[in-house]
Image (cartoon, grey):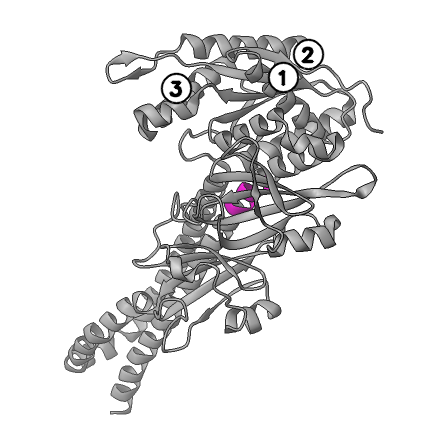
C-alpha cells in the first residue's frame, strides 16, 4: 500500500513539474520574443532619429530663416516618403508656431505647440538629445501619433525651435516575422517611465496610459532589466486578461518591450494532463504488480530517455537561436540584409578600412517615384518592384559586396576594397540593370528606375559622416531628375 501511495504521489508530482516546465517554456518564449522585437524597434527608432538629427543639425547651421525655405520642405517630404512608418514631420520656431510641415509647405503659423511638454523640455534643455513623445492628437490632421523631437540649435547654442517626426501607433506591425506566439498574446512598447506607446492588438483607449504604478514598472523593472512575472488573478490592468508578462528594457533607448501570454494558454496542456493522468493512475493500480517487476528495467530506460531528451533540447535550442539570429539580420520582404545588420557590417568594414588604409565605397539607392507605384497599383505591386530590384542588384555585385534594405524603398550597398572609380562603375551598372528590368503590372510593362548616391572613404572621422555624404549625393541625384548616379566628392575640410 505504501508503494501504491508513493506511485500516486509521484504521478501528481510529475504533473506539478509539468506545470513548472510549461511556465518556464512560456517565459523563455516571451523573453526570446522581447529580444527580437527590441532589436527591431531600436533599429527603426535609430533610422527615424538619424533623419531627424541630420535635419535639425543642417537647419541649425543654416539659421532660423532656413526653417521656412522650399528646400527644407522638399527634404522633409522626401523623408516622410522614404522612411518606413513615418506619418509626418513638423518644425516649430522658438515661440511654438508651426513654420514648416511635410503636410503643407510653409507650415501652419496659426497653430501653436508652445504648450506641448516636448517643446517646453527642449527649449529649457536643448542638449538632452532626442525626446520620445507619448501618443498625442495632432493639431494638423487630428490623428493619434507618437513622436520623436529634437531641438534645433543655431550657432552659439541659441535654440531656433524644434523638429518633430511622428509615427502612427498602429504603424509598427509587432507580430510580423515572429515565432508563433500562443493565441491571444499581446505585445506592447512602453517608455521607461511606464507610458504606453504601441500595442498589438491595438487598444486605442489604452495608448498613452501610465502604467508606472504597476508591479512591472514599480518593482520588477528596477530590480532587473529583463524577466517575467504574472499579472494579478483579476488580470491585466490593460485588458483584464490574466497573463504571463515577459519584459525587456532596451539598452539604446529608454523603452521597454512587454510580451503577454494568456495564462490559460500556458496551463491548457497541464490541465489536460491532469485528466489524462487520472485515468493512467487507475490503470497503474490495476497493473501495479507488472510495474513492480519492471522497475529496474524502466530505471535504465528512463536514464537513456533523459539523455536523449537533453541532446534534443540542445539541438532545439541551437535551432531557435539560429532562427532568431536570422530574423534579426534579414529583411523579411527581400531576403537581404536588414538595416541593423547592414550598418553593423558597414561599421566593421569601416574600421578595418581605416585601420589598414584600404579603400571603401558606399552606395545609397532610392527607388524613383515608388509612392506613386503603391498609390496607383497597390502595395503588392510595390513589394514586387522591391523584389525585382533586389534580384537585379544582387546579380550586379560581387560575393564580397553586401546589399541591404535600409527602409522603405531605400537600399544600401557596401563595397569593400573599392575606390572612387570602381564605386561609380558599380553604381552605373546597377542603375542600368534596374532600368532594363521587366516589371509587369496588370499585364503591362512598367518602368523601374533608381537614383544612386556614391561616396568613398576619404578622411571621414566616423561612419555617420560617410553615410551623410552618400545621402547628400542621393539627394542631388533625385533633385537632378532621378534615374542617375551622383558621386559626392571628398570633404575638403574633413574633421580631425
Towards the viewer: 175 or 320: 175
Q: Residue lying furthest bottom in this view?
A: 1
* SS of the residue under disc 3: helix
- For the point 31% across and 59% down, the residue is 184
Spatial separation of the CA atoms under disc 2 and disc 1: 8 Å
Which comes before the other along the chain, label 2 or label 1? 2
Q: Position of residue 21 (x, y in %)?
A: 39, 68
Residue bearing mark 3: 388
Residue 43 located within the stretch drawn in magenta? yes
Q: Position of residue 122 (x, y in %)?
A: 69, 51
Magenta part, dominant SS: helix
Towards the viewer: 23 or 319: 23
Q: Which mark is residue 454?
A: 1
Quadrant where the N terminus lies? bottom left
Q: Position of residue 343 (x, y in %)?
A: 60, 33
Front disc: 2 or 1: 1
Q: Is residue 407 above or below residue 161?
A: above
Quadrant where the C terminus lies? top right
* SS of the residue under disc 2: helix
Q: Position of residue 138 (x, y in %)?
A: 49, 48
Few, some or many C-alpha atoms within 10 Å of disc 1 (few <14, some 14-19, many ≥20)? many
Which comes before the other along the chain, label 3 or label 2? 3
Residue bearing mark 2: 420
Q: Are marks 2 and 1 in contact (CB under 8 Å)?
A: yes
- For the point 35% across and 59% down, the residue is 185
The span picked out in magenta is 40-46
Residue 50 located within the stretch drawn in magenta? no
Spatial separation of the CA atoms under disc 3 and disc 2: 27 Å
Which comes before the other along the chain, label 3 or label 1? 3
Towards the viewer: 272 or 13: 272
Amino acid at each position: 500500500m505504501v508503494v501504491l501511495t508513493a506511485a500516486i504521489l509521484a504521478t501528481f508530482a510529475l504533473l506539478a513539474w509539468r506545470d513548472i516546465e510549461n511556465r518556464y517554456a512560456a517565459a523563455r518564449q516571451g523573453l526570446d520574443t522581447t529580444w527580437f522585437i527590441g532589436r527591431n524597434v531600436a533599429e527603426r527608432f535609430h533610422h527615424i532619429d538619424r533623419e531627424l538629427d541630420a535635419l535639425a543639425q543642417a537647419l541649425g547651421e543654416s539659421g532660423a530663416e532656413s526653417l521656412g525655405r522650399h528646400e527644407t520642405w522638399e527634404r522633409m517630404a522626401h523623408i516622410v516618403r522614404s522612411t518606413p512608418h513615418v506619418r509626418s514631420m513638423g518644425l516649430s520656431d522658438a515661440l511654438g508656431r508651426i513654420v514648416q510641415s511635410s503636410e503643407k509647405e510653409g507650415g501652419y503659423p496659426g497653430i501653436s505647440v508652445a504648450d506641448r511638454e516636448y517643446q517646453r523640455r527642449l527649449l529649457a534643455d536643448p542638449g538632452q538629445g532626442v525626446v520620445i513623445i507619448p501618443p498625442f492628437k495632432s493639431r494638423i490632421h487630428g490623428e493619434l501619433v507618437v513622436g520623436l523631437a529634437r531641438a534645433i540649435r543655431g550657432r552659439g547654442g541659441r535654440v531656433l525651435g524644434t523638429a518633430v517626426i511622428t509615427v502612427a501607433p498602429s504603424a509598427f506591425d509587432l507580430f510580423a516575422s515572429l515565432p508563433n506566439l500562443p493565441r491571444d498574446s499581446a505585445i506592447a512598447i512602453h517608455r521607461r517611465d511606464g507610458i504606453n506607446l504601441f500595442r498589438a492588438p491595438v487598444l486605442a483607449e489604452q495608448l498613452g496610459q501610465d502604467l508606472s504604478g504597476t508591479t512591472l514598472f514599480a518593482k520588477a523593472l528596477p530590480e532587473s532589466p529583463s524577466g517575467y512575472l504574472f499579472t494579478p488573478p483579476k488580470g491585466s490592468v490593460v485588458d483584464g486578461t490574466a497573463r504571463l508578462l515577459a519584459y525587456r528594457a532596451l539598452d539604446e533607448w529608454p523603452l521597454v518591450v512587454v510580451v503577454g501570454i494568456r495564462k490559460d494558454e500556458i496551463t491548457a496542456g497541464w490541465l489536460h494532463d491532469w485528466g489524462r493522468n487520472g485515468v493512467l493512475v487507475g490503470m497503474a493500480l490495476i497493473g501495479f504488480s507488472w510495474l513492480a517487476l519492471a522497475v529496474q528495467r524502466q530505471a535504465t530506460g528512463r536514464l537513456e530517455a533523459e539523455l536523449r531528451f537533453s541532446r534534443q533540447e540542445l539541438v532545439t535550442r541551437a535551432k531557435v537561436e539560429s532562427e532568431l539570429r536570422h530574423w534579426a539580420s534579414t529583411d523579411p520582404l527581400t531576403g537581404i540584409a536588414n538595416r541593423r545588420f547592414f550598418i553593423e557590417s558597414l561599421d566593421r568594414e569601416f574600421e578595418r578600412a581605416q585601420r589598414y588604409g584600404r579603400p571603401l565605397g558606399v552606395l545609397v539607392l532610392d527607388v524613383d517615384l515608388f509612392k506613386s507605384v503603391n498609390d496607383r497599383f497597390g502595395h503588392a505591386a510595390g513589394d514586387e518592384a522591391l523584389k525585382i530590384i533586389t534580384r537585379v542588384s544582387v546579380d550586379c555585385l560581387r560575393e564580397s559586396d553586401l546589399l541591404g534594405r535600409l527602409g522603405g524603398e531605400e537600399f544600401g550597398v557596401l563595397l569593400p576594397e573599392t575606390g572612387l572609380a570602381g564605386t561609380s562603375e558599380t553604381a552605373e551598372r546597377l542603375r542600368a540593370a534596374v532600368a532594363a528590368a521587366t516589371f509587369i503590372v496588370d499585364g503591362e510593362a512598367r518602368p523601374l528606375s533608381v537614383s544612386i548616391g556614391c561616396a568613398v572613404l576619404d578622411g571621414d572621422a566616423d561612419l555617420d559622416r560617410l553615410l551623410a555624404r552618400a545621402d547628400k549625393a542621393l539627394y542631388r541625384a533625385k533633385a537632378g531628375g532621378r534615374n542617375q548616379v551622383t558621386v559626392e566628392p571628398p570633404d575638403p575640410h574633413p574633421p580631425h
